[in-house]
Image: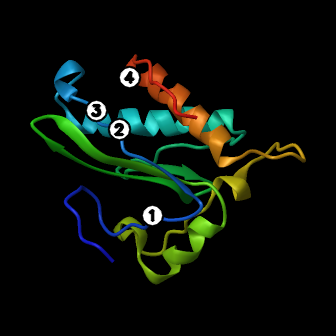
Amino acid sequence: LFWCERGGEVTYHGPGQLVVYPILDLRGYKQDVHWYMRALEEVILIALEKAGIEGASREKNLTGVWVSNKKIAALGIKTRRWVTMHGLAINIDARSLQNFKGIVPCGLEGREVTCLRDEVSVIEETSFSMKDVTIYVKEALEQVFGVTLLSAL
């Protein structure tokens, strides 16, 4: 376990997750952390829809994205002088779920976590890769924040 300065409670990052830490100067958008968190959730919702997830949503008074009453994506950020740090994590495959058993994710007692691969409704035999989901998130970031991101993919 490592302690870091960001919002949220205990979380896990590791194999099977797509972790995205955008660095944005919110002075060019809105100087509002709640707005930024909802914008990151929107990025996730758009990307999950492109991946074939149906029914992904926000839950009132909770941060993150949910499918079938299970958390599929978590957010935790920090800002310094309105520049963002940290970001979001989407659980892509079952490897991402194993290490949640030893913690109470985001301090939400009794709530389950899930992964994209377990929740996808329509998937071809070829399936999707981490690279595919990375592209969906990149496109969603561009759409929500009105930017063009360079790609190293």
Of marks 3 and 1, which one's residue comes earlier in the chain? Answer: 1
Q: Are marks 4 and 1 in contact (CB under 8 Å)?
A: no
Q: Position of residue 49 (x, y in %)?
A: 64, 35
Q: Earlier in the sequence, mark 2 or mark 3?
A: 2
Cα–Cα gap, marks 4 and 1: 24 Å
| Amino acid identity at mark 1 | His
Circle 2: residue type: Pro
Residue 144 pos. (x, y %): 43, 23
Name the residue: 75% across, 44% down. Answer: 128
The disc labelled 3 sits on which kind of residue? Answer: Trp
Residue 11 locus on image (x, y percent): 39, 66
Q: Secondary structure at mark 4?
A: helix
State the residue in front, 39 or 149: 149
Find residue 100 and report its horizontal and vertical position in percent.
50, 74
Residue highlighted by disc 3? 35
Question: From the viewer's perspective, is the residue at label 3 or at label 4 nearer?
Answer: 4
Residue behind mark 4: 145
Depicted 45 relative to depicted 119: above or below:
above
| Side of 98 relative to 32 (left or right) | right
Q: Amino acid at mark 4?
A: Phe
Dot 3 or dot 4: first in sequence order is 3
Q: SS class of the residue under badge 2?
A: loop
Query: From mark 3 to mark 1, how far is it between C-alphas?
Result: 24 Å
Marks 2 and 3, Cα distance to the nearest angstrom? 15 Å
Decide which of tag 1 and tag 2 comes sooner along the chain. 1
For residue 13, the mark is 1
Residue that label 2 marks: 22
- Cβ atoms at labels 2 and 4 below 8 Å apart: yes
Mark 3 lies on a secondary structure that is helix
Instruction: Give the label, 4 or 1, closer to the camera.
Output: 1
Q: Quadrant of the N terminus?
A: bottom left
